Amino acid sequence: MKLNIAVLPGDGIGPEVTNQAIKALKAIALEFNHNFKFVTANVGAMAIDKHNDPLPEETLDLCKSSDAILFGAIGHPKYDNNPTAKVRPEQGLLKLRKELGLYANIRPVKAYETLLDKSPLKKHIVQGTDISIYRELTGGIYFGEKQLSADGNVASDLCMYSREEIERIAHLAFQAAQNRNNKVTLVDKANVLESSRLWRKVVAEVAEQYKDVELDYLFVDNAAMQMILNPKQFDVILTENMFGDIISDEASVIGGSIGLLASASVGEKYAMFEPIHGSFPQATGKGIANPIASILSAAMLLEHFDLFAEAEMIRQAVDKSLKLNISTPDINIKYDNVTTGKVGEFIEDFISNPDDSNMNFTNIHLGQSTII
Ligand code: IPM
Ligand code: MG
C-alpha cells in the first residue's frame, strides 16, 4: 500500500517520540512491502516561533493532501504561564482538529500484565482493564463562543452541541462496542447541564439501532471515581470533549504511565494519530520520554487502513520491549539507562527480525542492533 503520511512533530518531546514511530513504520514498510512517504511540517509553539502562527497554511495544506497525519505534541511553558498570550500553541491543534473534521478521538486504555506493579492502583483493581474511550473532539466548550468583558473581569465559554454532532460519534462508539464487549457507558453531567441532557436523549435514540449493546449512564464526577475504584466495569466510554480530555488523563494512570497511551482522531475524510500526552518540556532532549504512545499511535494508523497484521506486529514488538524492560525510566523497573531512541531501535529491530523472539536482554548490546 502507498501512504503519504504528514508528520507534525510539534513541541517538546514531540519530535523525539515521533521519530521512533517513524522508525517503526519504516520497518513495517520494508517487511510488508509498503510504500510509506513521510513529509514533515511545523505546528505549535515552534511554528509560532518560525511563522507567528501555530498552524501555518502550508501545514494545513499538507495534512489535507496526505492520507494520514502523525502528530507529536504541542505546548510550551512560556505560553502556559501567560494567560494574556494572544497566540497559543494549542490553537494549532484545535484548529487542525476542527478544519479536518476530526470529530471522534479514540483512546484505548489497557493494563499491561508486565506493568501491573507500575500502576499506583492495586494490582487486582487494574488487572484486565481494557477500555476504549470515544471522546467527541470538535464541539462543546472547547469550541463554543468565548467572551471576556471589556474590563477583563468576567469571562465565559459556551458549551454547545447539536444532535448531528452527538449522533455521528455515538454510532462509532456503538459499532466499536459490537466488536468488543457490547457495552457503552455515556459519561455526562445530565443532572446539571442542558447539553448533557441532549446527549442522553440522542444517545438513547441511537442505541435503538444497536440492540445487542448495553447502554448505561454515569455522571462525570461518579465516572471519575469509578475509573479508579473499578476500571474493569468499562468497555466503551462515550463522552463529550472536555469530560473526555479529563477522564482519559485519569485513565492513563491505570496502565502505569501516560507515556503508553495512543489515540486516533478520525472524521469523514481525514485521520490523525497522536499520543494523548503533552509536550513534557522538562524532558525535552533528555532521551527519557516514552515513545510507546507514539509507536502505538502508528499501530492505530495502520489499523485505520486495515493493515491489521502490520499493526499487530508493532503491538508484539511493544509487548516484547515491555517484557524485556527495554523501556524508558517512567516504567522501567530494572534499568535506568534505556533511552527513547533505544526503545525505538529495539522495536524497529524486532519488526525486522520477529523470529528472534528469545533474545535475552542481558545478551544484547543496547544502542546497537539487538540482533547479534
Ligand atoms: C489532549 C490535549 C489537548 C486537549 C490540548 C493540548 C489542547 O490535552 O489532546 O488531550 O485538551 O484536547
Ligand atoms: Mg488532554
Image: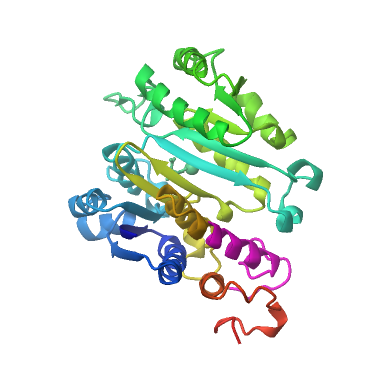
Measuring from the top left, give residue 191's x and y in whole percent.
Answer: 56, 12
Identify which residue is drawn at 65% across, 83% down. 364
User: Can the viewer see residue 283 in this picture?
Assistant: yes
User: Where is residue 233, by image quadrant?
Assistant: top right
Identify which residue is drawn at 68% across, 78% down. 359
Screen quadrant of the C terminus: bottom right
* The stretch drawn in magenta includes residue 317: yes
Measuring from the top left, give residue 73's x and y in whole percent.
Answer: 42, 54
* The stretch drawn in magenta includes residue 198: no
> Farthest residue toward the bottom?
372
Q: How is the image coloured?
A: rainbow
Residue 323 located left or right of residue 209: right
Highlighted magenta segment, given as a residue range: 312-338
User: Where is residue 230, by image quadrant?
Assistant: top right
Looking at the picture, does residue 50 appear above or below residue 204?
below
Measuring from the top left, give residue 57's x and y in whole percent.
Answer: 18, 50
Screen quadrant of the N terminus: bottom left
Looking at the picture, does residue 190 appear above or below residue 228?
above
In depth, the one of 143 and 178 nearer the eye is: 178
Measuring from the top left, give residue 229's x and y in whole percent.
Answer: 74, 34
Identify which residue is drawn at 42% across, 60% down. 14
In depth, the one of 154 and 286 nearer the eye is: 286
User: Can the viewer see residue 81 in this picture?
Assistant: no
How many circles with numbers are drawn on the protein? 0
In depth, the one of 83 and 107 nearer the eye is: 107
